Structure formats: C-alpha cells, structure tokens
Image: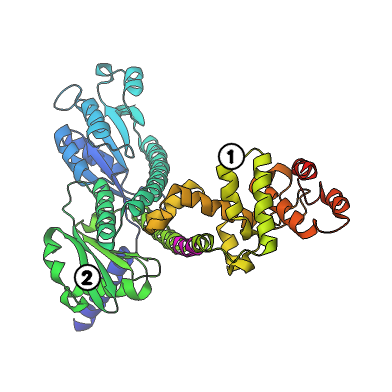
C-alpha cells in the first residue's frame, strides 16, 4: 500500500512538471445562446493544436457577457460569434463594439449563424470587420479545423505586426521623454508612467502598482511610487522592501537585466555612466502575461538616448572651454610685431577690395592672427570646433549656461571668424591643402583673404615677389584676390 502510494505520488508530480512545460494554449471565445453549440464546438476541437499549442475555451451566452469577458481577456485569439442571440443582430453589434469600443483589432472574429437569411453573407462580410462568416451547418470537423488554423495564422501575423509598430512607437517616444527630462526625478517618473501606460493598453481594467528607484553606492532613493506600493516611498535600503520584491531587485542589479515573474516585473534602465534606474510593476493575473518586448525596446532606446545625451553634454562642455580660450585670445592678442602688423593691414585692405564692409574688414583683421595658433598660445585641438552654426551655439547653451561674455551674437560671430581662419587657412585654391582638401570658392572668403595677406607679408620684401605671386596664383592663392594685390 505504501509502495503504491509513493509510486502514484511520483507519477503525479511528473505529470505536473510536464504540464507546466507546455506552451500556453490559444484562447477561443465561444459566443452563442445555444449551450449545445458550445458543447459540440469543444468536442470537435478537443484534440486540435496549432504550432504545438492547444485551445482554451471561454464561454459567453450573450453579447454583453462576451464584451465583458473580452475586457478581461485581451489576448483572446479567436471569437466564434453567433449572429442571432438576444436580438437578430446582437452578434453584429458585438463585432462593432469589439473593434471600436475595445479597440481590439488583433482578435479574429468568425460569425456563425443558423439563420443566414436574416444577415446575408455578402452584405455582412463587406460591412463588418470579420475574418469569415459561416452557416452552422457548414462547419464539419474538417472545415472547422481548417478555419481555426487559418484564423490563428492570421492572428499571429497581425499581432506580430502590431508588436513591431508598438516597438517603433516606443523608440520614437523615448526621444521626447529624454529631451524633456532635466533631472533624475522627472526622468524616473516619466519612464514609469510610460511603462504603466503601455501595460494598461494590454491589460485594461487592471490596477497596477509599483515604483521607480535609483541605487548608488548602496544608497537607495525611491523616485516615484504608485498604487498599493506608495507606502514604499520612504524605503532607503533594499532590506526595507518585501522579500519577494527585494529578491527581484537584487537579481536585476546583479544581472543588469529585466526580471519577469508571475504577475510582476522589474525593468532595468542603464543610466549612462551613472547609477541605473529600476522600475517595479505588479498587478496582472498569471494567465494575462503582457507582451514585454515593446517595453524592453522602449527601455533600451531610452538608455541609448541617455548615453547620447551624456556624450553631447561632455562635447558641449569641451567646446565651451575651447570657445572661451578663443575669446580670451581675441581680447588679448599677442604683441603686434612687424610681420603680424603687415598681415592685419593687408587683410583689412584686401577685405574692402573684395567687397566686405569696413566694419567686416576691421573685424577680420582682428582675427587674422589665428592663422598661426602657436603664436596665440592655443592648442591645435581648437581646430576641432570648426565653424559653429547658430544651432550649435544653441545646443551648447542647452547643456551649459553660456557665460555673459559669450552670449552676444556679435561675439559669437567674431569667434566664428577666428575659427574660420584657423581651420581653413591651410586649404589651397587648387584643392591640395589641408585638412579637408577644399578647393576654389568652397574655401571661405575670410580664409582666402588671410592666406594672401600672409603670403604678402612673407614675400613682399623679396626681389622676385611678382614671380612668386604668379606661381602661387591658382595653386595656393585665389586668382581674383591676387589681381587686387597686383593693382595695389
């Protein structure tokens, strides 16, 4: 007796283990006021399976009951709907309610009727969003099996398409979330709300609870909390949380990944080079597991954008330091020797002859010394700033407040002029220069003017200056500017 009992218990446990490893079944809703149709449908489809997944049936005996069941079970794959129930068009009205009020466009809806004359098939199939419309007498076991296979395949494809759309929306939305969040508290709250928003779409009428927290050097801060877990707002250590939640949080931190268990999840958001953020959410039933892929993609996209934002901030800080160095060099130029004096004088004269206003010509002469950064005591890394557009100045200001002396548009333009000279001075008219190999008019006029002024300062005292100018014209020097120098 004892031996047989032990053997029985062993077999039973083994069965439970094998059942738990089976994939979840497809949910099928049978909507019919005739109980016999429920029985017959289940009998015919008793051994049905598609992609190694069996069927799980939900029974509704009128349209109102079916609507409520679908509110609770958003993952029903197929609904077999009788047309005539409490009214002649009860099934048709239910179809509209599912598509419009529940906004469920994934479920495959199959109409069945025993009175086809009340709702002609040609009119119904065009008017209503249904997969098929069958007379009950037509649904033999083979026909019903074929219909279920085709409908499940369509449901799977449509669900996958909607999942991809949700993934794309999540990635796009993450951009606005990061852009509009200026502190960690706001970021945590916004991400948590987006997670619960997406879960609520999949699990309508479920009361979700949870929190967002940051953990840095064992210092814990709950940044946002909601629902029945709002009382955890004051937790300061992992040990303060309930044991199950604590275990999930530790697992997410140790493995640096999301953790999902029955009815609850922890989402792990890597926060650039800073400490991570964790989002815990619970509140759905074990048989209503949501699709986590869109949420995980949203978290991933948010993490990438946060990392990019950190890099942009670091870049903005570096550029701001370099721009301030350029400004100081403009304000405190080196002692003017004879060579630099000639360069500045020729720059101003050539600029006027090239059509620049006297004010522009004077401003250009003030930054002519930037053709040689070494004499200004500036590192070559200044060249990395290149030419800054108004948008780039604005971007720097978004990350760091500009000092008062850099806010003036005139000052910013003067810095840009200096950077133009520094960056493009080494370019040659024929395209053989550095750093970009620019040629002709693609080289900024300011850089071409300074290049000619420097050439004049270096060679004007030589007897063969005219010959050297002719050789350099068209190669190093702008031919049109060279004519101004010859006339001069």
Is residue 284 magenta-colored? no
Specify which label sits upstream in the sequence, 1 or 2.
2
| Spot occupied by residue 243 in the image (x, y as percentages of width and height) | 18, 75
Q: Is residue 392 left or right of residue 139?
A: right
Residue 357, numbered label: 1
Cα gap from disc 1 to disc 2, whole angstroms? 60 Å
Q: Quadrant of residue 383?
A: bottom right
Residue that badge 2 annotates: 221
- If the image is split into quadrants, where does the N terminus sit? bottom left
> In terms of secondary structure, what is the magenta stretch mainly?
helix
Quadrant of the image occupied by residue 117: top left
Magenta stretch? 316-325
Question: Closer to the camera, 170 or 260?
Answer: 170
The answer to whether residue 388 is seen in the rendering is no
Per the image, label 1 sits on a secondary structure element best described as loop
User: Residue drawn at (31%, 17%), measured in percent from left and top?
Assistant: 120
């Amino acid at each position: 007796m004892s031996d047989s009992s032990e053997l029985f218990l062993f077999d039973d446990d083994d069965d439970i283990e094998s059942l738990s490893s089976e994939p979840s079944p497809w949910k099928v809703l049978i909507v019919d006021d005739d109980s016999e149709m429920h029985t017959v449908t289940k009998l015919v489809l008793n051994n049905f399976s598609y992609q190694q997944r069996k069927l799980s049936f939900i029974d509704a005996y009128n349209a109102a009951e079916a609507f409520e069941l679908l509110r609770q079970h958003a993952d029903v794959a197929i609904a077999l709907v009788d047309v005539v129930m409490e009214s002649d068009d009860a099934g048709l009205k239910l179809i509209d309610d599912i598509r419009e009020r529940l906004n469920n466009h994934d479920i495959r809806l199959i109409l069945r009727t025993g009175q086809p004359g009340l709702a002609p098939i040609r009119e119904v199939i065009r008017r209503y969003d249904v997969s098929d419309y069958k007379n009950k007498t037509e649904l033999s076991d083979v026909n019903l099996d074929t219909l279920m296979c085709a409908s499940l395949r369509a449901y799977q494809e449509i669900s996958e398409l909607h999942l991809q759309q949700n993934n794309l929306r999540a990635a796009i939305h993450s951009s606005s979330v990061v852009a509009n969040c200026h502190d960690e508290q706001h970021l945590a709250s916004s991400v948590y709300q987006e997670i619960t928003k997406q879960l609520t779409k999949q699990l309508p009428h479920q009361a979700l609870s949870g929190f967002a927290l940051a953990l840095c050097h064992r210092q814990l801060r709950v940044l946002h909390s909601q629902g029945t877990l709002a009382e955890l707002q004051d937790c300061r250590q992992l040990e303060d949380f309930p044991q199950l939640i604590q275990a999930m949080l530790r697992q997410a931190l140790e493995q640096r990944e999301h953790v999902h268990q029955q009815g609850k999840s922890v989402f792990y958001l890597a926060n650039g080079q800073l400490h991570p953020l964790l989002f815990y959410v619970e509140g759905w039933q074990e048989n209503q597991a949501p699709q986590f892929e869109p949420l995980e993609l949203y978290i991933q996209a948010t993490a990438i954008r946060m990392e990019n934002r950190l890099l942009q901030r670091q870049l903005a800080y570096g550029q701001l330091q370099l721009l301030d160095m350029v400004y100081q060099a403009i304000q405190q130029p080196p002692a003017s020797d004879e060579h630099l004096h000639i360069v500045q004088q020729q720059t101003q004269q050539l600029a006027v002859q090239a059509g620049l206003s006297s004010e522009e010509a004077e401003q250009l002469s003030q930054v002519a010394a930037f053709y040689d950064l070494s004499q200004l005591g500036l590192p070559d890394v200044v060249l990395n700033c290149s030419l800054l557009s108004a948008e780039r100045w604005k971007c720097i200001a978004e990350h760091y407040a500009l000092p008062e002396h850099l806010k003036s548009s005139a000052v910013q333009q003067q810095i840009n002029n200096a950077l133009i000279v520094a960056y493009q001075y080494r370019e040659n008219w024929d395209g053989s220069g550095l750093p970009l190999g620019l040629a002709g008019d693609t080289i900024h006029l300011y850089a071409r003017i300074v290049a000619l002024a420097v050439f004049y300062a270096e060679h004007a005292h030589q007897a063969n200056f005219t010959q050297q100018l002719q050789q350099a014209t068209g190669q190093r020097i702008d031919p049109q500017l060279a004519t101004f120098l010859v006339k001069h």
